[in-house]
């Protein structure tokens, strides 16, 4: 009987995982280009793997009615957030012949339009439980 009671308590106990609710504000977004805004979230495990696959992805139309963008229920932890203004709607970042991005992009953490990124580890931010605001500046 005691074993059954312990099993029931274990199965019914509330989930103690804490979640972050994040509002993403994107500035310097050129609305005249149209298209979509794609948000990709990577955790530390996916950044350490050879093929970086986002653990969460959200795409919205590039218009004022869709901004800011809310990301719900990410477990508390360390993440890199990437934003792409996919102006032609093909789902990927397009590059010029010389390898320069032709569409707007931004990363969380230490990111500057003037400097080349030194890798994903500089773009990691900590998302705590509760509501928080992350502001990202798009580079074109």
Image (cartoon, helix red, strand yellow):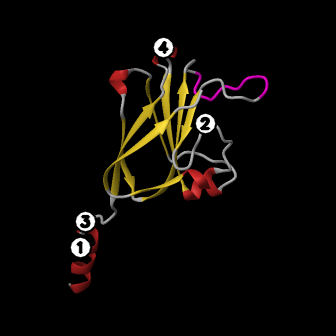
Q: Name which of mark 2 and mark 1 comes first in the sequence.
A: 1
Disc 2: CA contacts within 10 A as few (<14), some (14-19) or many (>=20): few
Identify the disc placed on residue 14.
3
Q: Residue at x 67, y 28 (%)?
A: 101
Q: Decide whether the magenta segment is chiefly helix, strand or loop.
A: loop
Left or right: 15, with 81 as reference point? left
> Sequence-wise, which precedes: disc 1 or disc 3?
1
Image point (66%, 55%), residue name: 49
Q: Nearer the viewer, residue 33 or 11?
A: 33
Q: Position of residue 48 (x, y in %)?
A: 64, 57
Q: Quadrant of residue 130?
A: bottom left
Image quarter where the N terminus lies is: bottom left
Which residue position holds label 1? 8
Tell me the CA gap for discs 3 and 4.
47 Å
Compared to residue 73, the image places residue 44 above or below, namely: below
Q: Which region is colored magenta?
A: 90-98
> Closer to the N terminus: mark 2 or mark 3?
3
- The image shows residue 110 at horizontal and vertical percentages of 56, 49
Residue under circle 2?
113
The disc at residue 32 is: 4
Towards the viewer: 3 or 127: 127
Choose mark 3 or mark 4, whichever is in front.
4
Residue name at image x 59 percent, y 22 percent:
90
Local crowd size for mark 1, using a 10 Å CA cut-off: few (<14), some (14–19), many (≥20): few
- Answer with left or right where residue 137 lies relative to residue 74: right
Secondary element at tag 4 = helix
Q: Nearer the viewer, mark 2 or mark 3?
A: 2
Identify the residue at image location x=27%, y=76%. 7
Label 2 vs label 4, nearer the camera: 2
Is 3 within the magenta?
no
Measure how far apart labels 1 and 4 are at the Cα level.
57 Å
Label 1 with label 3: CB-CB less than 8 Å: no
């Amino acid at each position: 009987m005691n074993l059954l009671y312990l099993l029931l308590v274990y199965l019914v106990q509330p989930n103690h995982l804490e979640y972050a609710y994040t509002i993403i504000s994107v500035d310097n977004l050129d609305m005249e280009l149209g298209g979509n805004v794609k948000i990709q979230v990577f955790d530390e495990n996916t950044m350490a793997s050879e093929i970086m696959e986002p653990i969460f992805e959200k795409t919205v139309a590039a218009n004022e009615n869709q901004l800011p963008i809310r990301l719900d229920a990410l477990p508390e932890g360390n993440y890199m957030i990437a934003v792409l203004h996919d102006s032609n709607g093909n789902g990927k970042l397009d590059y010029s012949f010389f390898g320069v991005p032709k569409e707007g992009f931004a990363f969380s953490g230490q990111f500057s339009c003037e400097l080349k990124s030194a890798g994903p580890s500089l773009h990691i931010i900590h998302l705590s439980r509760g509501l928080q605001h992350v502001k990202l500046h798009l580079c074109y």
